[in-house]
Amino acid sequence: MATDQQHGAGAVQDGSMQVVMIGLGDEKFALDAGLVREIIDPVPATKVAGARSFVPSVINVRGNVIPLADLRIRFGMPQTEDSADTRIVVIEVGIDDEPVLVGVTADKVYEVTEISRTDVQHTPRVGMHWKPEFIRFITKWREEFVIVPNMERILN
Amino acid sequence: MSSMDPTEAFRQEASELFETLEGALLDLGLRPDDRELVDSAFRALHTIKGSGAMFGFDRVAAFTHEFETAFELVRKGEIKPTQELIAVALAAKDYIRALIEAPDSADSIIGDAILDDLKRFVSPTAQVLPVGSNADIPPVSESRPAGWQLRLEFESHILRNGSNPIDLLDDLCKLGPCFVVPLTDGVPLLDELEPEDCYLKWDVTLHGACDKAAIDDVFMFVQDEMKLTLAQVERAAPVLAMPIADVELAAPPAPAPTAASVPAAAEPAAPSERKREEPRRTEERGIATVRVQAERLDELMDRVGELVIAQARLSQLAAVGSDLSIKMIAEEIERLAASLRDTTMGARMVPIGSLFGRFRRLVHDLSRDLGKPVEFVTSGEDTELDKTMIECLADPLVHLIRNAIDHGIEDTETRAAAGKTEQGRIELQAIHSGAQVLVTVKDNGGGLNTARIRAKAEELIAPGAAMSDHEIHQFLFHPGFSTAQTISALSGRGVGMDVVKRTIENMRGSIDLSTKAGEGTTVTLRLPLTLAIIEGLLIRVGEGRYIIPLPAVEECVELTAEDERSRGRNFLNVRGNLVPFLRLRDILDVPGAPGQHQKTIIISTGETRVGLVADQIIGNHQTVIKSLSKLHSDVTIFSGATILGDGTAALILDVAQLVALAQSRAEKQQMSEAA
């Protein structure tokens, strides 16, 4: 939800923020833990003909039909086959001011952790093959750069 | 419910009462002699007054009281309710509603003006009674009894229900001078006395030419908890004649003096009224109703939907296995789930009559404003529809009825010239038809002016194109399309019919129009019974499975080799008729070559038929509809999704969109062939 996002941003100002660390291809992304509803094993997805490429299908999560988003497409990353580590992270984001449940495919889910404000890096203009507006900020985790994506922008 | 704001509860109750009141007033305009209608209007008013006072809506209570008082003569049958009077009464009702819903914006000046009007309409006709004197001094007329002898015996628990016999006696005293004698023989010794029980009985001698009905009204809300013995008194006993001092209004709002010392509490006991109102109104004492929040019903429906899905999976598993006892349990659960689903759906069903009632006022007002006398006939009020659909239907029906009166029904002179009755007629009808409900709005006006619609349509299409009347009429549903030469306050802006169409299609319904020049227009809305569950036809296209809503399916035919060869022409020969068809594999982006035995499912909306080519027809599927999220709102060919027995999601094809798509393709094809 939008408020969650704001809370998350507030938390960064205070110094730390709870995140779920996921892997997509070679990159690591930190999803604001306030947005995450559950993490499930992959389920068969149903293709939606004519849908935008980053939300190509829908899945059944506990009797609800929710869209399955593929961030790899949004970030122009190569598609990978499902592996034993593949998970679906169900998040709740505000779309047109309404909370919407969305599944996000992750190649791997690492852990729930805290990232700290002191590590925040400004989004560099160069060396990035994705749009800066999709990124809230970049931070460091275990000596690696991780991206905190702006899910609302990505999905809208 | 328990957490519900009591004020909100009152508002809800009041809005139901307003519907009753409005219905009764409008009926009264048609059948001025029907006493039952007057009584029902009064009951509604009385309850609004009582509950209003209880919840602190003092202005409501005060105004309603004045309204009641002014209307009293109608109730006594001494003046007939005229059209003017009904109009003022309706205005008064609106004012009370405003007082409840937006008390700040309801100016008391308006209220005073309404009351003045009411009194003006009431007084001059009330010749029997000189204004300013007491209406109840006998004898008023020969046929009336001089008075009544009553004995009131209440059940001992009456006080615990919030009823106060003293208030009732007060109300009784307002009917005429009373002589009240309490009977104390039932009072036990102090040791045995329950402080919350009522031991007293009363003997009352009422002097006044009131009806028995008026007395019954006083005890309306407690009549189950008391014994009322009534006897007429032919001649007033001289001993009991009480001096009447200060009753001034035509109807007596002030309590008359009584022999027993009764505290002057003007308001009747409100709590008991609330309890009694429901059974009184329906007159079906055996049927108790519970008010449930709509969200809870929705939640229940969701749970049942999930249960149905889980049950389908269980049945599938049981069918594969060989364990007989599991199979039996699966069948048992299937049966239970089905009946639970039906019951839950039934709980959401509301008779459409509650909606129809609202339009009577609309027709009444429009007919007056436009100077076109219109008779409004409704039928099929008992037809039940899903609650959410009834709400969605209100706006489209308002549009259709407005159109019918404003454009459909001709003015009086034109009607006379055409040899029709002066009064126009609008019929609103609801009937069941299979898995659908048909709601029709029919007028006996001039019918659609096809030539004028065509002329206007030619601003959008090539002039002179060959079109059937039916196709021409479809232009009425184009956004911004209006043939009205002048824009009136009611219609002519061209917004409306497209909104109607969209709303109906959003409910997975369709709309038909038929018209006959000089005889009128009929608009038929075809609606599914419920929004939550549909019967669907499960089909396979490539690897994917899809649902087609079964009500739209007309028949399934094999795609013959001949049809197959006619590639590019995409027309199907169904018993001599050319039906355009769509290959779902193309629409759904399925790669690869189609299988050998392609099937065609003929679907229809109204008169238009379109074939859909699929790889396989799997069978019937009971479908719980899940809407697609906003992320997929740009995809128009699916109206929703459902969950299949194996837990995967399947998409429901949007019939209206596919038909439109097929038609536009067919038109293009015809045009390119013609060129």
Image: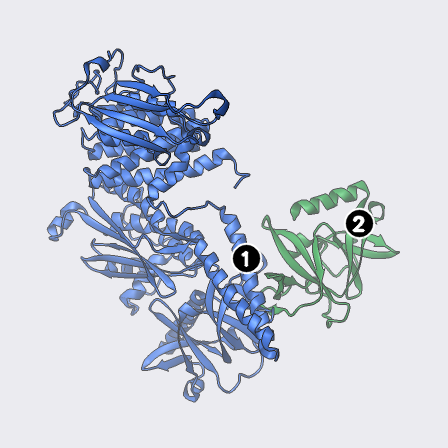
Q: Colour of chain B?
A: blue
State the residue position of label 2.
A122
Q: Nearer the viewer, residue B615 or B437?
A: B437
B327 relative to B202 in the view: left or right: right
Residue A73 locus on image (x, y percent) = 68, 65
Answer above or below: position of B514 versus B412. Answer: below
**Which numbered marker is on residue B302?**
1
What residue appears at the point 26 percent right and 18 percent down from the top-left corner?
B177
Residue B375 appears in the figure: yes
Q: Position of residue B294 (x, y in %)?
A: 49, 48
Closer to us: B590 or B623: B623
Image point (63%, 56%), residue name:
A101
Q: Measured from the top left, where is residue B411 in percent x and y? A: 18, 46
Q: Colour of chain A?
A: green
Task: From the top left corner, tell me how far across and down residue B565 is, in percent.
Answer: 44, 87
Q: Residues within 10 Å of mark 1 (few under 14, many from 20)?
A: some
**Residue shown at 72%/70% (left/top)?**
A79
Tag 1 subunit: B
Give me the residue at 74% from left, 42% from top.
Answer: A10
Question: Is A41 left, or right, of B592 in this rendering?
Answer: right
